[in-house]
Amino acid sequence: MLEAARAVPLAEQAAFEELLRRTWRPDFELKDFPSLTQQPSQPQVFLNETWPVLFMYPLLPESSSIYGVRLETVAYLSYALARTHSSQKPVVSPVFSMYEGGNAYILMQSVSRPKQVRQDIRPNFFGSTMVTLLLVKTNSLLDAVNNANVDFLVHIRAILKTAAGSKSDVFSTQTQQASFLDRLLLPRLASRVEIRTTSQPMTLLFERQLRVEDVLTAETLIILAVLGSAIVLMPLVLIRHFQAIERAEVEHERSAYFATHDVLTQLPNRYLFAERFDQVYADWEEKGVPFAVLLIDLDYFKEINDKHGHEVGDEILRVVADRMLAATRSCDTVARYGGDEFVALITDLRSPESAEMKATRVLEAIAQPVVTTIGEVPLSCSIGVSICPLHGQSLDALLKAADQAMYGVKKLGRMGIAMTKKRAI
């Protein structure tokens, strides 16, 4: 706290200086600040009186030389000093370098003391009015901020708006420079706080460069590890899941296939043949196109099995299946009905004679020697033919009619074709 005599007229400076030497400090003298600091004079506001420094608290030996310094000769105080004439509120100066070192700014205010009857004879240097000055060291503010700041990576800068309208940097905290990777990948956070006091209007700027270690905390690393594991494991789980689905689909198709086909010959079995019969029958009902059922029985097949074994018999059955497929059209259906019996569904017949022609082609295809592991085996077959609707309109009726015709061939010596003579009632 500094107190300065107020309104010492310029003409009374010498007398005032002599008075203080006699009554207060023998070494007292009025001083100009530029001469004291050996600095060049700066622009200042010229007043009609002088304002020497007369009192200081606390007493600092390193500051004793500023007793008697005219405040109006300090350029950065002259404007604020002039403002105290027209304002009863505190006025702030710009930040300046102190004579004893360091930076500071001053709050000054004109105050009045009530007039009292003096009880002693000590000189009254100040009278009833004075200008008080509060010196605020920026290093003290910086120390307080550093002590209160819990995050030393936050850069804090304080800017003071002076009475003259200019701006002065009060302090700026030191922070460790962020790495190039931090500046490249992560944002720099900034905030601005305005302290709108009449005496010390100040702006605080906060900046914080995010660093990789801010993001990659222990908790974040755990989360990233979990996510990374999920990213790695999820494709594996999905691949295994889809592989399981694919295997299930293949197995389903395989099961469905063997449920409707003969394992040995790969021909449709009696269940799929019945389904195909229903489709052809529905087509006949809609369009009236007749179809035929052929019942094929291999001649002397039991003797072949008994003589050469079932392995040779299986070879013959597979060859017969291939030959029947080659002798029929893709729209026809050839199925193994059991043992050495086969059935064929011949569609789109133009006449009963065309059914016999189809049967003859099948007969000729089968009645060829079969090359097996034991050599050639002669083969023949007997075929019975029934026509829808001539011999029946159901699968059982048509099979029964074809079976009767086929046994007629067997009685006549086998290896032939016969069409039932009985018409459906």
Image (tube, helix red, strand yellow):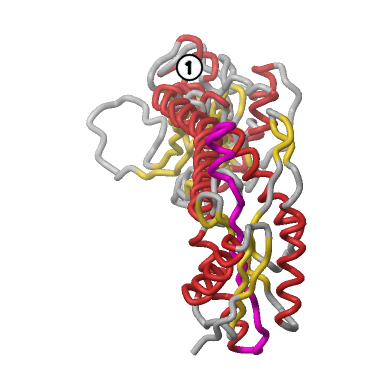
User: Residue at position x 52%, y 25% from top?
Assistant: 153
User: Residue at position x 58%, y 85% from top?
Assistant: 389
Residue found farthest to the top:
61
Residue wearing tag 1: 21
User: Residue at position x 51%, y 11% from top?
Assistant: 27
User: Residue at position x 70%, y 56% from top?
Assistant: 324
The residue closer to the viewer here, 34 or 425, is: 425
The residue closer to the viewer here, 309 or 318, is: 309
Picture layout, residue 129 above or below residue 4? below
Q: Which residue type does callout 1 highlight? A: Arg
Magenta segment: 286-310
The answer to whether residue 291 of the structure is visible from this angle is: yes
Residue 309: where, in percent of width, then height? 55, 32
Residue 417: where, in percent of width, then height? 67, 66
The residue closer to the viewer here, 11 or 162, is: 162
Q: Is residue 323 magenta?
A: no
Residue 108 relative to residue 264: left or right: left
Q: Residues within 10 Å of mark 1 (few under 14, many from 20)?
A: some
Q: Quarter-wise, where is residue 209 in the image?
A: top right
Quarter of the image that includes the N terminus? top left
Picture layout, residue 175 above or below residue 355? above
The answer to whether residue 157 of the structure is visible from this angle is: no
Q: Secondary structure at mark 1?
A: helix
Q: Quarter-wise, where is residue 70 in the image?
A: top right
Q: Is residue 297 magenta?
A: yes
Residue found farthest to the front:
412
